[in-house]
Image: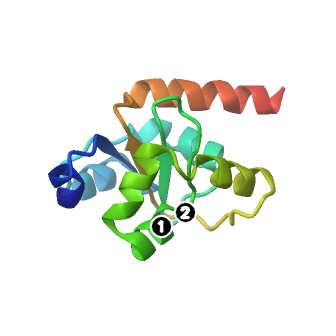
């Protein structure tokens, strides 16, 4: 995160926990400096992304579309360069094809971190995810 800020990249990290109760979420979250999705809304995020393992980074631009479901792999391979790639949307088309053709794996329940590129308000993301979740069910 420090390297991203040093490179003037506008990103926000939003923590999404899969802890089983609010006090556990708050205890873990107290060690972090970024915002968190409210405990009672976590199931919407996990259902939408169909994953809630540790660690998990989902990369979203300000329009709310998923750029990458493999943020951890991207950062492991490219480091801070992956942040530049996401903000420049260079990988958007490739990643959308990979998501469309189902190359993404879905893993077991534990916890997730959502990396939001640009300035996305958590509430807006939850509303968008909820709307898409409802659309899928109808």
Give the left or right position of residue 118, taking residue 59 as reference. left
Nearer the observer, 47 or 83: 83
Image location (x, y in percent) of residue 20: 45, 55
Image location (x, y in percent) of residue 10: 28, 40
Q: Which residue is rendered at x = 44% and y = 44% of the image?
A: 88
Q: Which residue is rendered at x = 50% and y = 44% of the image?
A: 89
Nearer the observer, 90 or 75: 90
Q: Is residue 17 visible?
A: no
Q: Which residue is rendered at x = 74% and y = 52% of the image?
A: 97
Quadrant of the rendering where the N terminus is positioned: bottom left
Q: 10 Å neighbourhood of mark 1: few (<14), some, or many (≥20)?
A: some
Image location (x, y in percent) of residue 59: 48, 49
- Helix, strand or loop for disc 2: loop
Which residue, given by chain and number where applicable, does mark 2 sit on? 70
The image quadrant of residue 72 is bottom left
Nearer the observer, 100 or 81: 81
Q: Is residue 132 above or below residue 13?
A: above
Q: Which residue is rendered at x = 72% and y = 27% of the image?
A: 134
Give the left or right position of residue 55, taking residue 69 as reference. left
Which residue, given by chain and number where applicable, does mark 1 sit on? 74
Quick check: marks 1 and 2 in contact, CB under 8 Å?
yes
What scheme was used to colour the molecule? rainbow
- Helix, strand or loop for disc 1: helix
């Amino acid at each position: 995160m420090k390297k991203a800020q040093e490179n003037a990249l506008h990103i926000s990290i939003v923590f999404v926990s899969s802890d089983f109760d609010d006090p556990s979420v708050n205890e873990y979250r107290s060690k972090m400096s970024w915002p968190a999705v409210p405990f009672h809304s976590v199931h919407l995020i996990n259902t939408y992304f169909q994953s809630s393992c540790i660690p998990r980074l989902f990369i979203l631009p300000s329009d709310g579309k998923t750029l990458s479901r493999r943020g951890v792999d991207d950062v492991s391979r490219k480091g801070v360069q992956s942040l530049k790639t996401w903000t420049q949307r260079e990988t958007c088309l490739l990643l959308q094809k990979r998501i469309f053709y189902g190359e993404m794996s879905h893993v077991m329940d534990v916890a997730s971190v959502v990396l939001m590129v640009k300035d996305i308000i958590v509430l807006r993301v939850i509303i968008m995810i909820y709307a898409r979740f409802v659309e899928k069910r109808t």
